[in-house]
């Protein structure tokens, strides 16, 4: 396995000193090392992968140096436009070093949402004419791959990619940051929300641990899973799925359980929700200021005023809660008030280690959910 600090030092020796991207569970130890050893203005956790490419292009324009962009391969879709219309050698000829976590590698067990991404990733890079190397877990070979990739980026004046397999990096211990003083975990908040909903209400939950916690709580209470659409992939798109449902099912309340990182990834969705103002859409952002599902890296969630953004976008009702009683009161209020609503619930970072995963396939979830919507 590769020692993250040795890889970091290798990058430094090769004059790579700017890092940006969206966290990935396969890269969490590398990202932790970067965070620990890089000034804030030299490491930016971007809202989405496309934004990270734009940041990297700006850095190169200002310095002439090669930046590093890290992402999970699920984010390749978000980088296609800026890669091909900005950084490509035929456009602005921008050398970039990508480090991509290979979720869903063929032959390696992974979740359903990663299988297709993993299977087609290398062919997608080939189609975009982006040179790539699958990084060895041998340190000497890995250092050689980094040096060669950077030479290629400079020679081609374009992007190159380093592909990281599962368990490539060894663990990297970071200094413990002070925990928030919030009362509830995300799981506790989700359980309280589900307890307050009526049997006819529709739930759309965001990707990552939130959907896993919804699934487990329903199973624990023998409630079935037909009321919940579990957005296991497509980070940041849960509220638009919920909007699409709410516009067609105007007689039923639709509750979107969103995350701060997901909401920030495609923040414009709040503007679209507000422009259409569906009276039955109840948007809940569970905000712990972290990308909790992929290593706990910080988001800008606690620096952003989600309520003001929603208010100026056209949401009729906005509120914030932290305690059990506040959640109960605010949920009761937005249930009774007609109009597009946003409730931000501030929660603790972290999840229990034995949290399970959905036992239904995505197609099974979809079929049960469609039947529930039509009932």
Image (cartoon, helix red, strand yellow):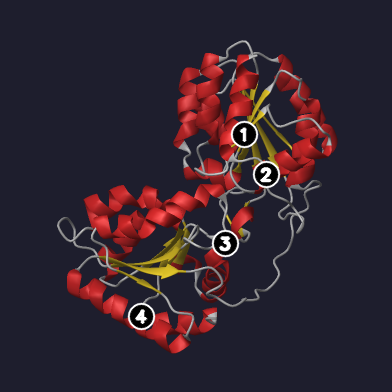
Q: Nearer the viewer, mark 3 or mark 2?
A: 2
Distance from Cα at disc 4 to Cα at disc 3: 22 Å
Q: Which residue is mark 2?
A: 358
Residue placed most toward the observer, 75 or 54 = 75
Residue 353 is situated, as x and y percent measured from the top left of the image, at 75, 59
Q: Which mark is residue 365?
A: 1
Residue 47 is situated, as x and y percent measured from the top left of the image, at 47, 50
Q: Is residue 131 visible?
A: yes
User: Which comes before the other along the chain, label 4 or label 2?
Assistant: 4
As helix, strand or loop, the secondary structure at mark 4 comes to helix
Q: Quadrant of the C terminus?
A: top right
User: Which comes before the other along the chain, label 4 or label 1?
Assistant: 4
Residue 191 is situated, as x and y percent measured from the top left of the image, at 79, 37
Distance from Cα at disc 1 to Cα at disc 3: 25 Å
Label 4 neighbour load within 10 Å: few <14, some 14-19, many 20+: some
Q: Is residue 291 visible?
A: no
Q: Is residue 109 above or below residue 48?
A: below
- Furthest residue in direction front, as rendered: 107
Instruction: Identify the residue at horizontal 53%, vertical 72% (top origin).
Output: 30
Q: Is residue 5 above or below residue 43?
A: below
Q: Which residue is mark 4?
A: 145
């Amino acid at each position: 396995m590769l020692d993250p600090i040795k890889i970091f030092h290798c990058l430094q020796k090769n004059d790579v000193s700017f890092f940006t991207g969206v966290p990935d569970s396969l890269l969490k130890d590398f990202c932790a090392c970067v965070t620990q050893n890089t000034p804030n203005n030299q490491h930016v956790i971007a809202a989405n992968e496309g934004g990270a490419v734009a940041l990297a292009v700006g850095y190169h324009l200002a310095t002439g140096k090669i930046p590093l962009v890290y992402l999970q391969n699920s984010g390749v879709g978000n980088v296609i436009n800026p890669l091909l219309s900005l950084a490509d050698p035929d456009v602005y000829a921008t050398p970039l070093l990508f480090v991509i976590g290979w979720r869903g590698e063929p032959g390696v067990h992974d979740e359903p949402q990663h299988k297709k991404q993993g299977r087609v990733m290398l062919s997608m890079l080939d189609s975009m004419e982006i040179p790539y190397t699958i990084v060895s877990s041998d340190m000497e070979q890995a250092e050689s791959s980094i040096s060669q990739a950077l030479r290629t980026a400079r020679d081609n004046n374009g992007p190159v990619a380093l592909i990281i397999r599962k368990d490539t990096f060894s663990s990297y211990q970071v200094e413990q940051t002070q925990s928030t003083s919030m009362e509830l975990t995300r799981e506790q908040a989700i359980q309280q929300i589900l307890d307050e909903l009526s049997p006819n209400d529709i739930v759309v939950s965001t990707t990552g641990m939130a959907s896993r916690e919804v699934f487990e709580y329903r199973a624990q209470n023998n409630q079935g899973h037909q009321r919940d659409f579990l957005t296991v992939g497509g980070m940041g798109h849960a509220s638009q799925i919920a909007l699409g449902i709410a516009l067609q099912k105007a007689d039923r309340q639709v509750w979107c359980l969103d995350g701060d990182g997901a909401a920030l990834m495609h923040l414009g969705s709040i503007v679209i929700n507000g422009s259409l103002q569906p009276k039955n859409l109840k948007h809940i952002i569970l905000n712990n200021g972290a990308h909790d599902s992929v290593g706990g890296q910080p988001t800008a969630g606690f620096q952003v005023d989600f309520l003001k953004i929603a208010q100026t976008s056209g949401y009729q009702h906005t509120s914030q809660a932290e305690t059990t009683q506040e959640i109960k009161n605010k949920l009761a209020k937005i249930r009774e008030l007609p109009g597009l609503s946003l409730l931000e619930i501030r929660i603790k970072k972290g999840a229990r280690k034995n949290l399970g995963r959905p036992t239904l396939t995505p197609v099974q979830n979809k079929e049960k959910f469609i039947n529930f919507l039509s009932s």
